[in-house]
Structures are given as structure tokens and as C-alpha cells.
Amino acid sequence: MIRIDTLRKQFPDRGNLVNAVDGLSFEVPEGELYTLLGPSGCGKTTTLRCVAGLERPDSGEITLGETVVFSSAQYVPTYQRDIGMVFQSYAIWPHMTVFENVAFPLRVSGERYPRKHIDESVERSLDQVGLAGYEDRMATQLSGGQQQRLSLARALVRQPKVLLLDEPLSNLDAKLREHMRQEIRLLQQRLNITTLFVTHDQIEALAMSDRVAVLRDGQIEQEGTPEEIYTNPASEFVADFVGGSNLVTGTVLSRSTGAVVVETKFGPVTAVPTSGVSTAEGTDVAVAFRPEDLVLLERGAVDPGAANTWPVEVMLSSFTGAITDFRVVTESGQEISVRSPSRNASKERYLFMHAPAAICRLLPRSGVVTRA
Ligand SMILES: Nc1ncnc2c1ncn2[C@@H]1O[C@H](COP(=O)(O)OP(=O)(O)O)[C@@H](O)[C@H]1O
Ligand SMILES: [Mg+2]
């Protein structure tokens, strides 16, 4: 439904050119929610604005449905693209009522819609976002969450084939954000509307998407389902950005069937090999482990000769309800994050940290895991 092929966009920056979008290619099948996830400045908004026709790419091709809306030979202006867009700022009109805000795209579309069509369309989309009854309010009299819904209603009023969402939840408080996350996903699935979603928030991306592309410097570092991205990160960058892994670097000491031993600054670490990562002796690698996969043990519970078990000192423990987040430090001075269910959390200051080999993910020192 959405197809992006080798899209490029540069901007001038103090005499240089910045590659905001650097050869991006991806496809979003009909009815799916596809997320571009990455840190600030990685090119998310620029990509979305290119799809919307608000930014003119330098090269590449953009296809929406059957229509090529951008190529070296073709340029379809924004108002003729079958899209609805929600901006990070909402961009609603403060001097207009709720009704007029939602009607706006119909009034400026160039078509002369009969009044009945406008009324019905506005009612339908206000209903879809749960704002029926608010027609006559001024937009500024709405709460943050309601303004968010209003911008969504306005994006949907022309019943577009494609919905573009640029960090739509970032101005909401934590509780409302979580609620709206589910509402948007439910609405997207109910309308079966193909959606390109942009966020820097990895939890949002994991929770809402059919597929996620992790962006770095205008390029896709890894694409996959939320489960794939989280379970099998392809690089140090993805392991760290999505889910926050602990990373330790080292060199391969030895390998046998099913196990690779890596010399690191806190001693040998035994990991399971990752297909696509070289494990020849002497190779520089990184080992990533998720905070929730690590186990903290009291002295009495430790098997003295066990692999991947190191003494640590607890620097901080934060009780957050069901889980407790620990910050511990190894004897070599490396700080590590550990998450434990609070009911198992020890109160002792000196503990042992155990990393089962199966959860130690081997990654290349630079670049990404090459797919077989
Ligand atoms: N209009 C512009 N003029 C100059 N540089 C821009 C412009 N828009 C974006 N950029 C630059 O392009 C890069 C990508 O920006 P953007 O797409 O906004 O990133 P994101 O939405 O991921 O935070 C950044 O380095 C940003 O400074
Ligand atoms: Mg942005």
C-alpha cells in the first residue's frame, strides 16, 4: 500500500549537506501499522513529510496504493494524495470550533462538497475518536487528550487510504499516553487503515506496531516485528535503543559447539553463538544482556564454579511496584542494570549477578548482524 524506494533528502547545514534521509526503502502492506523508530534527528519527520508531499525528496520513489506520488518523473501535490496526517504539535486551529477544525480539510480540498456531506463526514469522524457532542466548543477549550483526538478526527475526515502519525502522543502525560496508544491501535485496526507511525519511544513502537524499522542517521538499521527487534537485535545500537540492553565488549577466547567464550573486562562470558556473527578466535564482539534476564543472587545461593557469575555491589535499588530496578557495579567498575520481580528482590548490598548463557546475545563490534 505504501512503498518507499531508495528515498533521499539532504538539507544544507552551515555550508555542509546533512543526509536527513539516506536511501530509505520499505513497504507497508494494506491495513498494517508500520513504525519508524529512532532517536531525535534520525530522519523520521522528514520521511513522513516526504510521503505527505510537504517535503520534496532529492531522489527515490514513493508509491501510495497504485499511484506513484513521487519519482524523478512525477510529483503529486499534497492535497491530491490520499492521506491524513497528525502532526506532533496537533496543529489545530485555535480560533475555530471543533466542528470547523474537522471540516477544514473538506472545505479547502478544492471540491465543493454539499453541506450534508460535510455534516455527515464530520459527525462520523468525531464519533470515531469519541468526540461526538463537542462540535460547538472552541478547540482551545479542549484538554490535551481531546485536542489529540481532534487532530485525529481531522486526519480521518476525508476517509484517507493512508494515515501518517508524527509522534502523536508525545505531548500527553504518561497515563493518557498509554490509554491513547491503545485507542489509536484499536481505531487503526477497526478502520483497517494503512498507517505510518513515527516515534522515538520504543515502548510505543513495540506496543502498537505490526512492523518496526529502527532508524539511525537516515537509514534502516533493522526491520522486523516488535518481537524480532526486541529478541534478536541486530546491532549494539538496536540492542541499546530498544529495551535498553547492558553491553560489554570483548574478544572471542574460544568456541565449541553451542558456546562461545568472550574475554571481557569483567572476566570470561559464555554466550550462545548468533548466526551471522563471526566467532573466530580473537574477533572483537559485544555481548548484550537485557536487565530483566539477569539474576541477582545472595552469597548462599551461588554455585561457586558457575559460569557467568560475578560479584557485584548494589549502588541503587528503585522499587517501582511489581518490579525493582537495580543499578549494580562489577569489580571491574562496569555499571549494569538489572530488573527483578520485587517479590524476589534482595535487600543485601553485596550480591552475585548471574547471566544465563542463553540470554547473552553476541553482536558484531560494528555494523549489523548479516542475515544468512
Ligand atoms: N528544514 C530543515 N532544514 C535543515 N535541516 C533540517 C530540516 N528538517 C530537518 N533537518 C535535519 O534533518 C535531520 C533529520 O531531521 P528530522 O527528520 O526532523 O528527524 P526526527 O524527526 O527523526 O527527529 C536532522 O539533522 C535535522 O536537523
Ligand atoms: Mg521528528
Image (cartoon, rainbow, N blue to C red):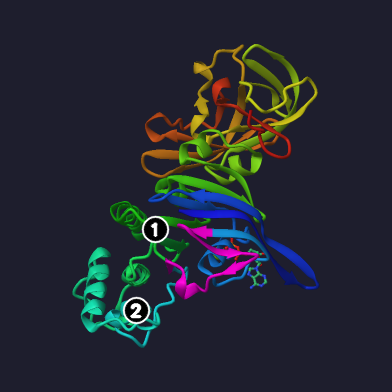
**Residue 290 at what x, y percent from top left?**
54, 34
Q: CA distance from mark 2 to mark 1?
A: 33 Å
| Number of residues whose C-alpha sits closer than 10 Å to that of mark 1, classed few (under 14), some (14–19) or many (20 or more) | few
**Residue 7 at what x, y percent from top left?**
63, 58
Q: Magenta stretch: residue 332 in it? A: no
| Number of residues whose C-alpha sits closer than 10 Å to that of mark 2, classed few (under 14), some (14–19) or many (20 or more) | many
Pair 2/1: label in front: 2
Q: Residue at x 61, y 11 (%)?
A: 305
Q: Residue at x 30, y 76 (%)?
A: 142
Q: Would you say residue 356 is visible in this rendering?
A: no
**Residue 352 at what x, y percent from top left?**
56, 25
Measured along the vertical axis of the image, is residue 230 above or below residue 257? Answer: below
Measured along the vertical axis of the image, is residue 118 above or below residue 300? Answer: below
Query: In this view of the protein, which residue sits in the foreground, 211 or 308?
Result: 211
Quadrant where ligand 1 appears: bottom right
Measured along the vertical axis of the image, is residue 190 above or below residue 80? Answer: above
Provide the residue designation for mark 2: 106
Q: Residue at x 57, y 66 (%)?
A: 50
Ligand 2 within 8 Å, label 2 CB = no
Q: Residue furthest bottom?
A: 95
**Quadrant in which the C terminus is drawn:** top right
Amino acid type of the residue tagged 1 in the rendering: Ala
* Mark 2 or mark 1, earlier in chain: 2
The boundaries of the magenta stretch are: 63-85
Query: In this view of the protein, which residue sits in the foreground, 131 or 272?
Result: 131
* C-beta proximity under 8 Å, tags 2 and 1: no
Tag of residue 174: 1
Query: In this view of the protein, which residue sits in the foreground, 323 or 28?
Result: 28
